[in-house]
Image (spheres, rainbow, N blue to C red):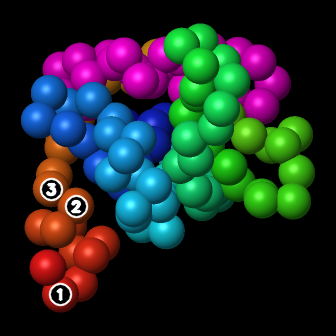
C-alpha cells in the first residue's frame, strides 16, 4: 500500500468508533498517515462537536491550528472491520476512500502497556 492511515482508536463490538471510550483514552488515539514518497505525518484522532450527527472525527496534526486537520466522512457510522471502507477528507478538501486492512485490539498492539 502506498497511501493510507494507521489509526489507534477504541472500537465497540460492532467495529464502530466509541466516543465514550475515546474520552477515557484520547491520549492513545494516534494516527500515522503514509502517502507515497511523502514523509509520514503523525497526529491525534479527535472527536469534535458539530458535523453530521452532531459530532465529527478529525485527524489533528497540529493542535494549534485547524488548517491541517483531515475530517473523517461519517466515521461514526462506518465500521472498522477488514474489508469495509472508510473515507477521509484531506486538508485540501479532497475525499479519499480506504479499505480497512486489519484491526487489532489496542491492548494487543502495545499502545496501552500494563493491561
Can you identify the residue that label 2 sits on? 106
39 within the magenta span: no
Identity of the residue drawn at 36% across and 16% down: 77
From the top left corner, tell me how far across and down residue 101 is, in percent. Answer: 22, 34
Residue range in magenta is 71-95
- Which comes before the other along the chain, label 3 or label 1? 3
Front-most of 78 and 94? 78
Identity of the residue drawn at 17% across and 68% down: 107
Secondary element type, mark 3: loop
Front-most of 111 and 101? 111
Query: Which image quarter is the C terminus in?
Result: bottom left
Q: Measure the C-alpha gap from mark 2 to mark 1.
A: 12 Å
Query: Which image quarter is the N terminus in?
Result: top left
Q: Quadrant of residue 52?
A: top right
Relative height, residue 56 to residue 46 (above, below): above
From the top left corner, tell me how far across and down residue 15 is, in percent. Answer: 20, 31
Amino acid at each position: 500500500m502506498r497511501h493510507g492511515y494507521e489509526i489507534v482508536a477504541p472500537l465497540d463490538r460492532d467495529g464502530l468508533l466509541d466516543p465514550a471510550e475515546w474520552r477515557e483514552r484520547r491520549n492513545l488515539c494516534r494516527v500515522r498517515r503514509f502517502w507515497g514518497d511523502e514523509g509520514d505525518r503523525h497526529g491525534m484522532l479527535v472527536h469534535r462537536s458539530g458535523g453530521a450527527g452532531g459530532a465529527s472525527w478529525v485527524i489533528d496534526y497540529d493542535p494549534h491550528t485547524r488548517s491541517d486537520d483531515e475530517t473523517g466522512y461519517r466515521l461514526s457510522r462506518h465500521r472498522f472491520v477488514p474489508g469495509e471502507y472508510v473515507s477521509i477528507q484531506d486538508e485540501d478538501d479532497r475525499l479519499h476512500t480506504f479499505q480497512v486492512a486489519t484491526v487489532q485490539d489496542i491492548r494487543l498492539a502495545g499502545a496501552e502497556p500494563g493491561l
